[in-house]
Image (cartoon, helix red, strand yellow):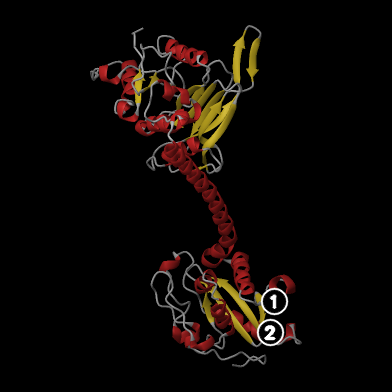
């Protein structure tokens, strides 16, 4: 094994279980498959700016006992097992945890059954001296991943860096599995040791980036997907991971990334404390605001989805929520009277009683929707002779397959609705008034009245001019069924 002198040169020694890419010769086109794999494994680390990032690589054949970190160490003899064992022994002798980075999967190969240069299946990470393994399953292209809330600063920083990978970069969902050992007496299964802490998760909540820590704290593994920017990872190691897990490693080499509080001036201590406080408050405020945003979205989504994209009961429920928010007392007539005996909703406000029919149309709204409400109005005196209606409204989610910004502003052309005794309201307009809490506009639209003070609506989001309800007066519907 080649000798390597160490000293306080400011660079943190990092072990990588491949040959120095600078000494790898370009392969002949006829080179054996094994040689190609060796060359590809080393090439992944060829463009790392080691010195600029504050680190010094220790390749295969170099002493690793003083290394602070190991990247993709190997368990196999003549392929890095000796270097891995010296790295672990060195960390143990110093009473420090062994910090290890392992990649899951093979980015340039869709088949995880293809073995890597070290002989391991592409979707598996095995521990050293501990039972269990992390097994990965490659996700389909376009998988969405998100950051786990409540992480410490180091883990959060790693997660944010990896979230910025290209959109087509692969991910593997990870699981902690038991170890099965075959012997003369059969197969013995050992439960996995340690704790796996997710950092990034997929849409099902399965980790795609995680930290595993052994039960005794002697080993800390960060498992990340293959196909990363190694400059980002090494920078994170020196800037975040080592100060968090192995700060003595930075002190030993007198890294300029390490500041010993015991040696600071009062001005340095004050500035550092203020910065730490700022970061802590930022994380606390961000977590609080993220929670508020999530709660607000959960409250808004049923109304937004119902009014803009819904049909049937989803649309009716959303309309009822908006009317109640605008001050109406709302009754679900389908539920109270059963079936389709009458319109969908009865809305009462300040002595006005309105039948509200709620409909959806995938394309342009047909005029039969108008006739349905007219029939309900004619039949209402038979259903509730003691509760006359004074008005009615037809609310339609028209062209619901189109993006809201692409839909026509009005449900029907003016020549169709001008002669009607009740207003026809686009559910997208109802959404706009609900979103801005313009309750007078909702009331005026449903009741078929001009807005108070002659106010008019401004153009909706997207720039289209929408005729305001207050620009025309609807003839009130009398209970006798004539306009």
Measuring from the top left, give residue 369's x and y in whole percent: 56, 77
Measuring from the top left, give residue 135's x and y in whole percent: 53, 27
For the residue labelled by badge 1, is the local secondary structure a helix, a strand or a loop?
A: loop
Quarter of the image with the N terminus is: top left
Quarter of the image with the C terminus is: bottom right
Residue that badge 1 annotates: 341
In whole angstroms, how far apart are the C-alphas of marks 1 and 2?
9 Å
Residue that badge 2 annotates: 379
The quarter of the picture where residue 310 lies is bottom right
Marks 1 and 2: CB-CB under 8 Å?
A: yes
For the residue labelled by badge 2, is the local secondary structure a helix, a strand or a loop?
A: helix
Q: In this view, does 270 lie to the left or right of 166?
A: right
Within-10-Å neighbours for mark 1: few <14, some 14–19, many 20+: few
The residue lying furthest to the front in this view is 266
Q: Which residue is drawn at 59% across and 28% down?
A: 195
**Can residue 24 be seen in the rendering of this structure?**
no
């Amino acid at each position: 094994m080649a000798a390597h002198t160490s000293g306080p040169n400011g660079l943190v020694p990092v072990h990588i279980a491949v040959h120095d890419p600078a000494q790898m010769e370009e392969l002949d086109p006829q080179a054996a498959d094994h040689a190609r794999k060796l060359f590809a494994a080393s090439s992944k680390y060829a463009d790392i700016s080691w010195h600029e990032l504050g680190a010094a690589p220790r390749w295969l054949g170099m002493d690793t006992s003083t290394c602070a970190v190991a990247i993709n160490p190997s368990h196999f003899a003549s392929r890095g097992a000796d270097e891995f064992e010296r790295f672990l022994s060195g960390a143990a002798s110093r009473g420090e945890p062994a910090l290890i980075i392992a990649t899951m999967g093979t980015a340039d190969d869709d088949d995880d059954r293809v073995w890597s240069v070290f002989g391991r299946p592409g979707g598996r990470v095995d521990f050293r001296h501990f039972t269990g393994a992390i097994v990965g399953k490659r996700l389909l292209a376009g998988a969405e991943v998100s950051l786990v809330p409540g992480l410490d600063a180091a883990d959060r920083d790693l997660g944010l860096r990896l979230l910025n990978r290209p959109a087509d970069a692969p991910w593997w969902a990870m699981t902690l599995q038991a170890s099965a050992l075959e012997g003369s007496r059969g197969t013995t299964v050992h439960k996995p040791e340690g704790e796996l802490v997710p950092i990034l998760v997929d849409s099902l909540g399965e980790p795609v980036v995680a930290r595993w820590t052994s039960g005794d704290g002697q080993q800390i593994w960060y498992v990340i997907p293959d196909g990363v920017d190694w400059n980002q990872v090494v920078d994170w190691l020196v800037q975040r991971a080592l100060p968090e897990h192995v700060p003595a490693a930075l002190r030993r080499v007198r890294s300029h990334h390490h500041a010993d509080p015991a040696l600071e001036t009062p001005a340095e201590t004050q500035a550092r404390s203020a910065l730490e406080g700022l970061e802590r408050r930022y994380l606390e405020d961000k977590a609080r605001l993220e929670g508020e945003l999530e709660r607000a979205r959960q409250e808004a989504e049923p109304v937004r989805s119902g009014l803009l994209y819904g049909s049937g009961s989803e649309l009716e429920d959303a309309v009822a929520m908006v009317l109640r928010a605008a001050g109406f007392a709302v009754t679900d007539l389908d539920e109270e009277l059963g079936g389709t005996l009458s319109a969908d909703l009865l809305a009462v406000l300040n002595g006005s009683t309105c039948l509200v029919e709620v409909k959806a149309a995938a394309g342009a709204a047909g005029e039969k929707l108008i006739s349905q409400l007219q029939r309900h109005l004619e039949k209402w005196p038979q259903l509730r002779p003691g509760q006359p209606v004074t008005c009615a409204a037809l609310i339609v989610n028209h062209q619901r397959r189109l993006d809201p910004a692409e839909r026509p502003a009005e449900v029907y052309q003016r020549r169709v609705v001008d002669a009607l005794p009740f207003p026809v309201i686009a559910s997208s307009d109802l959404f706009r008034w609900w979103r801005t809490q313009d309750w007078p506009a909702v009331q005026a639209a449903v009741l078929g009245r001009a807005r108070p003070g002659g106010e008019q609506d401004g153009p909706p989001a997207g720039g289209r001019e929408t005729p305001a309800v207050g620009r025309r007066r609807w003839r009130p519907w009398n209970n006798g069924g004539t306009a």
